[in-house]
Image: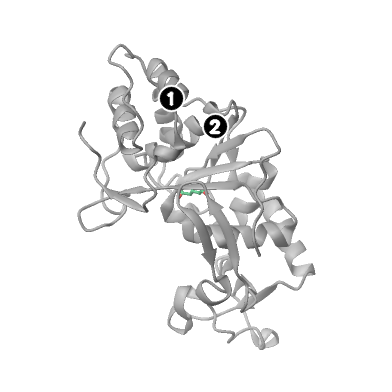
Amino acid sequence: MPATPQTDRPYRGRFAPSPTGPLHLGSLIAALASYLDARHHRGLWLLRMEDLDPPREEAGAAARILASLEAHGLHWDGEVLWQSRRGDAYSAALAELERGHHLFRCDCSRQQLGPGGACRGRCRHRQAQLGSPAATRLAVPADCRITFRDRIQGQQDVSLGTELPDFVVRRKDGLHAYQLAVVVDDAWQGVTHVVRGSDLLDSTGRQILLQQLLGHRTPCYGHLPVITDAAGHKLSKQTHAPPLQDDRAGDNLRAALRFLHQPPPPLEAETVADILAWACANWRLEAVPAVLGIHGVPTR
Ligand code: GLU
């Protein structure tokens, strides 16, 4: 089904970090691009802490992320939304999907799952025999296709039914899954524009399907290239990306702007506030390269 994005409401953007570690240059790029796009459109920029997965979290990371954003002049609007406090909203969405007969329970082991982590229909017809623990999956019709126009990466056509079917909405350990939480919260926060890394492009088709089933509007999406190492792996905590140094905020912002192919702020822009004000006035999303990944950050 083609997703018609909303353009008739005032812009509300967001940044949604997971507190699995401190911010690094890759996460700053996503924060900065979503911030500049929102502010350039005179929109709000909201902050959501995706602290949904305690086993993957690092103690103190959420506070450190917030301090880093502040140090880089990236001030958000309103209160931070903490996903750890939103369990009831996720359960209500699951109940609605259940009423529509869109869910099934699955106790497949990793080895039994098909490509893309999908349950190959093994569990759908043996629901009565399943014990616990079991994951809850969304039953994706085999012919389900999602199309949308990404503001950076262009037209997308996802054969969800064959490529990424039957995804998890509630994990075996009882935790709500990222795909569900993000859709419930983007709708709750009234998000109209999502600007984030291309590593999440794969998730967007699933999120649009959930929006359609839950009766939510689809935001406009823009997926940025991610920074990669020489082997093409995304810069991340797993690939030992160094944490951002908050006392070098101006240099970090300038590096992020170079990565995004934005014009360099003049040297007279000394403070982070000056750099951001200049970058916001001169922001051009069209200049961001339409590629999924770029190796390193240009030095000048
Ligand atoms: N929490 C996710 C992450 O840090 C981002 C979610 C999103 O932007 O939709 O990768």
Question: Residue 213: image x %, image y %?
Answer: 72, 62
Q: Amino acid at mark 1?
A: Asn
Question: Residue 240: image x %, image y %?
Answer: 25, 49
Q: At 26% from the left edge and 41% from the top edge, which residue is drawn?
A: 242
Left/right placement of residue 237 relative to residue 215 reads: left
Which quadrant holds the N terminus? bottom right
Q: At 46% from the left edge and 47% from the top edge, which residue is drawn?
A: 152
Q: Earlier in the sequence, mark 1 or mark 2?
A: 2
| Residue 297: quarter of image | top left
- How far apart marks 1 and 2 lie (CA) works out to 13 Å
Q: Residues within 10 Å of mark 2 (few under 14, many from 20)?
A: many
Residue 177 visible within the image: no
Above or below — where is 172 with respect to 127?
above
| Residue 72: quarter of image | top left
Above or below — where is 96 with respect to 119?
above
Provide the secondary structure element on which disc 1 rests.
loop
Between residues 45 and 161, which one lies in front from this camera angle? 161
Q: At 45% from the left edge and 78% from the top edge, which residue is drawn?
A: 115
Number of marks in the rendered image: 2
Q: Amino acid at mark 2?
A: Ala
